[in-house]
Amino acid sequence: MKPTSVYERIQKLSSRADPYPLYTELRRTPVSLQEDGSYVVSTYEEIIALLHDPRVSSDRRNLASPPSPQQDGLPPAFIGLDPPEHDRLRRLTMRHFGPPDTPGKVAGMEGELREIITGLIDGIADRGRADVVDDIAYPFPVTVICHLLGVPREDEPRFHQWAEEIVETLGPGEGDQEERAGRRQAAILALGKYLAELANAHRDRPGDDILSGLVTYKGPDGPMSDIEVITTSALLLVAGHETTVNLIANGTLTMLRDPVLLERLRNEADLVPHFVEELLRYEPPIQFLPNRVALDDITIAGVTIPRGSSIVLALASGSRDPAHTKDPDRFDPDRAYNQHLGFGGGVHHCFGAPLARLEAQIALSELAHRLVNPRLVKDPPEYRPSSTLRGPRHVEVEYDGVVPPAR
Amino acid sequence: MRGREALMYDPDPADDQREQVLRAAAACPVQALHVDRMTTQHRTVRPELPPSPTGGDDDFKRNGRIVIVGASLAGGRAAGVLRRDGFTGSLTLIGDEDHQPYDRPPLSKQVLTGRVSAEGTTLPHLREIEVEWLAGTPATGLDLAAKQVGLADGRRIGFDKVLIATGARARRWPNETEAGLDGVHVLRTLEEAELLRERLDAGVKRVLVVGAGFTGAEVASVCRGLDLPVTVVESGAAPLVGALGGVVGAVAADLQRENGVDLRCEVKVTSLEGDDQGRLTGARLSDGSMVEADVAVIALGAVRNVEWLRNSGLAAGPWGVATDAGCRAVDVNGLVTDDVFVAGDVARFPHPVYHYQFMSLEHWGNAIAQAEIAAHNMLSDQAHRWPHLSLPVFWSLQFGVNIKSVGVPTFADEVVIAHGSVEERRFVAVYGYQGRITAAVTFDQAFWLDFYRRLIEQAAPFPPDFRVVDRQDGARPVPAEVSQRVVPAQGATVMVTGHDPGERRVALANIQDEARH
C-alpha cells in the first residue's frame, strides 16, 4: 500500500484535535507536491511571499484544468477573484463597513456586541452546564452578522444548514469528492436564491444595513450587479458566522485549559487583545487557504510550482514555524512581536478581521469574567469535520454560577 | 484616511483613545505600531534577544565616550540602539534645535492640515534613554587628531567615537531680500511647519509652491485639501520627475491638475515680488508671466549640513559625507576612518545593488537603517560589523494617493506599467536598467512592493515577463525619462570627496622615501 502523505493524514478527522505535530512534519518540506497535483506550502516566509506574489491568483478558473462553470453554482465572490475585479467588489462592500467611507463602524458596535453577549451569558445563568458553541460562540456572531447584513435573525435555521454544508465541503475532505461537490453546489444555489429574494426586498425598502447599501449604492464603482450582490452577501453571511464561532470556541478551550491564563484575563484588561492575537496564531479558525493558483511558473524554496497548479497555503502551520516564532507551540499572550497568519494576508486579508477581533475579545473577556469556576467537561472535545475551517462541534462547560456583568 | 491607501496616523493620540490604540497595536499584522516603547527591536523569533554579538572592546562599551552630532531621527535612533546593545559609557547628543528628536514626515501632511499639533510629532526615543543632551548648540568643527567636536559656544567635547548625523536643511530662496519677504516659507523643521500652518490658517488668497518634488507636491496636496488656490512651478517636465522619472511624473502631473492645482512645468521663478510693507505679492516666471500669491513655499530640496566639517579632513561635500558600506566615514584621501561614523541624510554610501555608486538618500527608512548599523558597528570589532545593504524605500501621500517606492527609480533606462491602471491611479511601475529590475513605484498598490523588492535583490530580468494578476494587455517598456545620472565614479577624487577634480587633495607618497626604509 502506498504511504499516506502528511497532508492526507491532516485531513483525517482523527487528526483534528491536535494537527500541530503533523504541521511540524509538513514543514520539513516547505513546498510539497501532493498526489492530486497541488502544492502545499507550510513555512512562514514562503507563505508570506506567496500571499504578496502577483503571480498567485485566487481565481480557480485559472487552474490548468478549471472547474466547470456549473460546478460551483455561482460565480466567485471577491474572495475567489483577482484584482481589479476583486478590488472593485471589495471596495463596494467596504464602503458600508469600514474606512475610508465608513470609519468607526466596527468600533461603534462595541456597545451592541456587549449587549448581545450579556444576554447570551444571562441565558445560561440558571444552569450549571452549557455548550459554549451552541449557547454562545455560534449565536453571538450570527446575531451580529444578521443585524449588520440585514438578514432576519429568525431565518437562521434555513441558512444555517446551507452555510454548514458550504463550509464542510470547502477544501479536501474524506469521502467521495463528487458527492461533496454536488452537496456544495446545491447549498450554494439554495443560499443564493434566498439572498436574491432578500436583496429585492431591501431594494424596495432599504434599511441601515450592508445589503441595503449594496443594492442601493450607485457611485463611480457601482452599482453591483444582481449576481454580485448575491455572491457578496453569501460570502459575508457564511464567513461572518462560520469562522468567529471557532475562534471563540478555541479561545474558550485555551483559557479553560490554563487556570493562570484565566485568572490573568480576569485581572488584566490590557491582556485581552494580546490573548486574541495569540489565539489567531496558535489556534486559528482558518487553517488553510486551499484555493490559490499559480499564473506562471513560480520558484520558491527550491521548488518550481508549474503554471496552472493549485497552491494550498497552510496558514496555521506557518504561524507555528519555529524559524519565524520563538517557542511556537507555547501559548504566550505576552509575545513582544506577534506576526501571525490568522487572517491571511495580501489583498485578500480577512475582510471581517476588525469585527472578528472585537467579537472574540468581548466574548472571551465576558466568559472569563462571568463564569464562576468554569471547567471543561470533555477535553479534547468532538471536532467538526473540516480541516480547513477547524473548530470543536461542542465545548461543554460546567460552572458554579454566573456573576452579573461588570457594567 | 484619504483615498484607498493614504492613511495618516495620529502620532500623539489623546489618553481616552488609549484602549483603541492598544488594540490597534496588538492587531497590526506587521507589528509596526509601537506604544510607549522604542522601536529598536523587530524580531519574532527572539524578541528579547541579547544585544547582537559585537565582539568589541568591553572596556569601551563600559566606559567609552560616544558623541552623536545631530539629534533628529538618525541621531536619536542611534542613541537608543547604543544603549540597547549594552553601551553604558557616556553618550552625548548634540543638536542645533531646541527640541527632542521629532518625526518629520507628518510635518508636510497631518501637521500642515492642522489635524496634529507640531509638538505631537516628538519621537519617544529620548524620553527613556540616558543621554547628555546638548540642545540648541550647533557643532562648528570636528578635530580628528584631538578627537573633539567643537561647539558654537566655544566648548570642545571629547570623544572616543563620534557619529555624524547632522542631516540636511531646506534650501532657501537664493535671493536674500526676496527670501525675507513676509509670506515666503520653507518646510523642513517643526517651527517651519508650525509657521506655515498658522499662515495657511489665517486665510490665504493663493499659495505658490516653488518646486514639485515630494515636499512641494505634498504641500500642494494639503493646500488643495484646505480648499486653497495653489500654483506649483516646476523647472522640470513634471512633478516628482527628479525622483521617479518622466513617465510616472506625467501621472503625478495629471493628479495635480485633476485636483485643481495650477501646475506650470518647465518654467522657473525668476523673482519674488513684494509690496512696500515687505509682504509677498507674487512671482515673476521665466515665461514672462506673473503669479499673484501671498504665500510662497520654497520646496527646492535640501542642503546637507556639512559646513562644520569643512576642515576636518573628511570627504564631506555638497553630496554629503562619504562612508564605506558600514557607515564609517572616509577621509579626503579615500582612507576609511576608525572612529567616525555617519548616518542619515548627510551620509553618502556605496550601494552594492547599484554598482557601488555613492548615494545619499533623504528617506526616513534609510535614516533608521543607517543609525542601527552605525550604532552596531561603533560597538563591534571588525569581525562583527554589518554592511548597510537594505534597498531604499520611501512613501508619499498626496491627493489621496499612497505613492511608494523600492529601489532607486532613477537608476533606470526603461520603465513598464507591470499591473494596475494608470487611468485609475492605481498601478505598479517597474524600472529596469540594462536588462535587470532596479526599482518599483506603486500608486495605491503598496502590497506588491515586497515582491518587487525581492526581484531587485535578485537582479531579476527586465522587463518582467511573467503572468500576474491585474496585468495590462499590451504594456510595453518605454524610456524611463530619468534625468541624466551623474556618474561620479570616473575619477577617484570626485567619487570620494565630492570636490571638483581640479581641487586636488591627494598627494602621492614619495616612493623613494618609502624605499629607503
Image: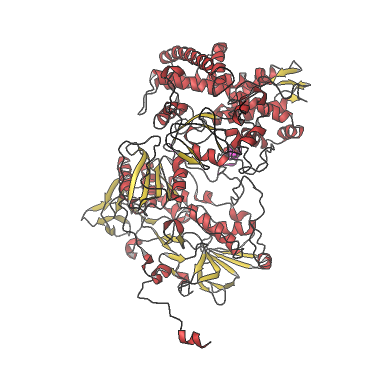
Does B32 sit above or below residue A42? Answer: below
Side (left or right) of A31 relative to A12? left
Percent x, y of residue B323: 48, 65
> Relative to B200, is A239 above or below?
above
**Quarter of the figure that contains the N terminus of chain B:** top left
Could one spot residue B16 in this view of the protein?
no
Viewer-closest of B171 and B224: B171
Q: Does A165 sit left or right of B485 as displayed?
A: right
Q: Is residue B181 left or right of residue B131?
A: left
In this picture the colour scheme is secondary structure
- Residue A169 horizontal/vertical position (percent): 55, 19
- Work out whether residue B50 or residue A317 is closer to the camera in this orientation and state it: A317
Q: As displayed, is residue A273 above or below residue B403?
A: above
Q: Position of residue B337 (x, y in %)?
A: 53, 70
Q: Residue at x 37, y 61 (%)?
A: B172
Residue at the far left: name it. B288
In front of the other: B194 or B219:
B219
Residue B18 lies in magenta, yes or no?
Answer: yes
Above or below, B320 against A59 in this view is below
Residue A324: image location, x then y, percent: 61, 43
> Hey, which quadrant is residue A68 in on the image?
top left
Most extreme residue toward the bottom is B516
Q: Residue at x 63, y 56 (%)?
A: B52
**Is B320 positioned to the left or the right of A406 in the image?**
left
User: Can residue B11 be seen in this snapshot?
Assistant: yes
Q: Which residues are magenta?
A: B1-25
Q: How many marks?
A: 0
Residue A213 magenta-highlighted: no
Residue B503 lies in quadrant: bottom left
Identify the residue at the far front of this view.
Answer: A1
